Amino acid sequence: MKIDVVSIFPEYLAGLQLSLIGKAVDQGLLDLTVHDLRDFTFDRHNTVDDSPYGGGAGMVMKAEPWALALENILDEPKAAGAGTPQKSILIVPSPAGPVFNQRIAEELSEAEHLVFACGRYEGIDQRVIDWSAEHFDLRPMSIGDYVLNGGEVASMVMIEAVSRLVPGVIGNPESLTEESHEDGLLEYPIYTKPASWRGRDVPDILLSGNHGAIARWRRDRRLELTAEVRPDLLAELQDLDKHDRAVVE
Ligand code: ADE
């Protein structure tokens, strides 16, 4: 998967060089490039913003540097994939977008090319957003109902959530199937040695070696936890059987 990020703070994205994502880049599973928007400005001050037409607080990011940066990305040669090339997906982090979730992460993990446009200030001139819809599969995307100072942190959140689903990025693919949000339930509690710690014992069942009973216990804990802290997730689940329903009621 190819990932391009455009930002006026490229150093912000340095964290992506660490840990599993950094390793996946080193291994060639991810081709990640961070571009500095100011490289696409031609005045002495590398201006990327200006005051809003119609008045109001704050500044607006100018259209032309964005168009040049995005055109530059589209012009780059892409790895030849099988079949017809997919349109590149342009993700514009914004609190005004639909809310990102695990389903969207799964969908995006199958894309060939993701581009993240990290806006700052009050946002980007709407005309370049409209223009980009002609060249990209445009996806405004929020990471939650709160306001950040720019799109960098939101992009890092989405890049991490998507990248770890790309085959090969996580060493043991089984760890992906048993985690929170994968099937709509939150994760069960986990324990490691010692079996007794400061007077607190690991639940007996986990020491029993009875795999069927452990699986049932874990599912029950997931159901209980989800019912307690995220009843909204539980309400969306269609496949609860009689036992499951008895646990959550
Ligand atoms: N930019 C500012 N706030 C944001 C949010 N909640 N999600 C995505 N991008 C943002």
Image (cartoon, rainbow, N blue to C red):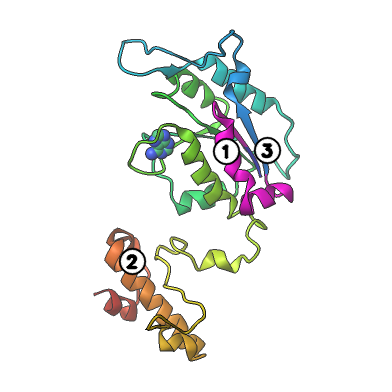
User: Where 112 falls versus 175 (above or below)?
Assistant: above
Does the magenta run of residues contain 199? no
User: Where 41 falls versus 119 (above or below)?
Assistant: above
Q: Which residue is mark 2?
A: 226
User: Where 148 falls versus 102 (above or below)?
Assistant: above
Q: Amino acid at mark 3?
A: Pro
Q: Quadrant of ligand 1?
A: top left
Residue 22 percent across, percent down from the top left: 66, 48
Crowding near pointer 2: few (<14 within 10 Å), some, many (20+)? many
Q: Amino acid at mark 2?
A: Thr
Relative horizontal placement of residue 24, taking residue 57 as reference (left or right): right
Q: CA distance from mark 1 to mark 2?
A: 33 Å
Relative depth, front residue between 147 and 78 = 147
Residue 155 percent across, percent down from the top left: 51, 39
Badge 1 or badge 2: first in the primary sequence? 1
Q: Secondary structure at mark 2?
A: helix
Residue 239 percent across, percent down from the top left: 38, 70
Residue lying at 54% horizontally and 29% vertically, measured from the top left: 9
Crowding near pointer 3: few (<14 within 10 Å), some, many (20+)? few
Total number of numbered discs in the rendering: 3
- Comparing marks 1 and 3, which lies closer to the viewer? 1
Q: Which residue is mark 1?
A: 13
Crowding near pointer 1: few (<14 within 10 Å), some, many (20+)? some
Residue lying at 41% horizontally and 24% vertically, measured from the top left: 121
Residue 133: image tag: none
Relative horizontal placement of residue 189, taking residue 224 as reference (left or right): right
Residue lying at 50% horizontally and 31% vertically, measured from the top left: 118
Residue farthest along the left direction in this orientation: 249
Q: Residue 5: which quarter of the image?
A: top right
Q: CA distance from mark 3 to mark 2?
A: 40 Å
Magenta residues, start to end:
4-30
